[in-house]
Image (cartoon, grey):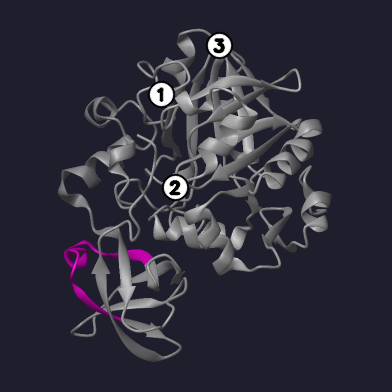
Amino acid sequence: METQKTALYNYHESLGAKFMPFAGYEMPVQYPYGIIEEHKITRSNAGLFDVSHMGQLLIEGNEDLAIELEKIIPTDLKTIKLNQSKYSFLTNEDGGIYDDLIVTKVKKGFSIILNAACKNNDFKIIKTALGNKFMITLHKNLSLIALQGPKSSEILEKNINGVLSLKFMNGNKFTYKDEDIYITRSGYTGEDGFEISIPNNLVEDFAKKLITQGVKPIGLGARDTLRLEAGLCLYGHDINESTTPIEANLKWAISKRRRKEGGFVGYSKIKSDMNGQLTRLRVGVKPEGKIIAREGVKIFSKDDQEIGSITSGTFGPSVNSSIAMGYVKYDFSKPGTKVILEVREKKYDAKISELPFYKKNYAR
């Protein structure tokens, strides 16, 4: 299958981007100034990410839609306010995660942001669950860009009046060049920022405008270091179809009513995890020294028992240390627990750490 390109591909090329295939798309991994500099720019100023490879799904329907969607998404969709967003999941019969997603209540129904590698399968799962009762559209004419960093709000306000009034995990419809765009105050970096859904024919013009105002383009490389410092999961690595939200330390994303009442796919396994049957947990891991523990590195207890493995690892430029996340047996998940990492057949000391590694700076 031919690798797809986003509407901004040629613009990335003109900015000197280095590309890599990701989830079926040719995506910019870094620009000439490099991943560490891009990371620091996002933390101190404002960076622009092209995330148009992700799926933008619109489900249109009446009040029955929330009832039907709650059978496959374990959040409280009946009480979600207009333009409010929630982080949630599509779960399978074993409580595993088909995908993690952002659901936003909009006037016509619900807008859902899906991971790029999962979007076509998600569409089938949702379509099968909802049948033909509602209109479901996976948009191909929309791009998605993320403006992230402490300066992002003042820069965006200059171009789109009114975005400053948005609260974290809330959005609204705005206009740009007489066309509708939808902006949510959210992101994947641990910083204040916005995700902007905009027609393909306008995205390059809008991106150029932001970059002439001092915003820098940021690739997938820095996106990964930023999200890992913020303790955020990457689908297919830190969570997948064989991890439950409770094992993934994401119980907070299942609303209290849904934890109590259930009524969604995979609830029996998730309920048993919550009721003391949990055998493993996603944790932060801080290796001692400069060793980088990549995905797949085995984790051992101090008495040499294999207790888990790393799912993501990197050097964190903002915390100036090696950081990682992974799963360990529940009895070893307490922060401060000393563990051993096996990297290229050598053993290194490490300890279980609180998440996130970096204090999030969202606009509450």
Circle 3 sits on which residue? 61
Crowding at label 3, few (<14), some or many (≥20) Cα neighbours within 10 Å? some
Q: Position of residue 212 (x, y in %)?
A: 72, 46
Q: Nearer the viewer, residue 132 or 153?
A: 153
The amino acid beneath tag 3 is Gly
Local secondary structure at mark 3: loop
The residue under the point 76% across, 45% down is 6
Is the residue marked by circle 2 packed among few (<14), some (14-19), or many (20+) residues within 10 Å?
A: many
Residue 80 is left or right of residue 58, and the answer is left
- The amino acid at mark 1 is Glu
What residue sits right under mark 2 in the picture? Answer: 191
* Residue 124 image offset from top left, x and y in percent: 62, 33
Question: Sequence order check: which comes first, mark 3 or mark 1?
Answer: 3
Q: Residue at x 42, y 36 (%)?
A: 87
Residue labelled with disc 1: 70
- Say which amino acid is labelled 2: Glu
Q: Where is 217 relative to 270, above or below?
A: below
Give the quadrant of the C terminus: top left
Residue placed furthest toward the bottom? 346
Q: Is residue 307 visible?
A: yes
Q: Residue at x 44, y 17 (%)?
A: 66
Measured Cα–Cα span from mark 3 to mark 1: 14 Å
Left/right placement of residue 173 relative to residue 5 reads: left
Residue numbers of the magenta segment: 325-340
Image height check: is 288 above or below 101? Answer: below
Q: Is residue 334 magenta?
A: yes
First in sequence: mark 2 vs mark 3: 3
Gap between marks 1 and 2, in whole Å? 30 Å
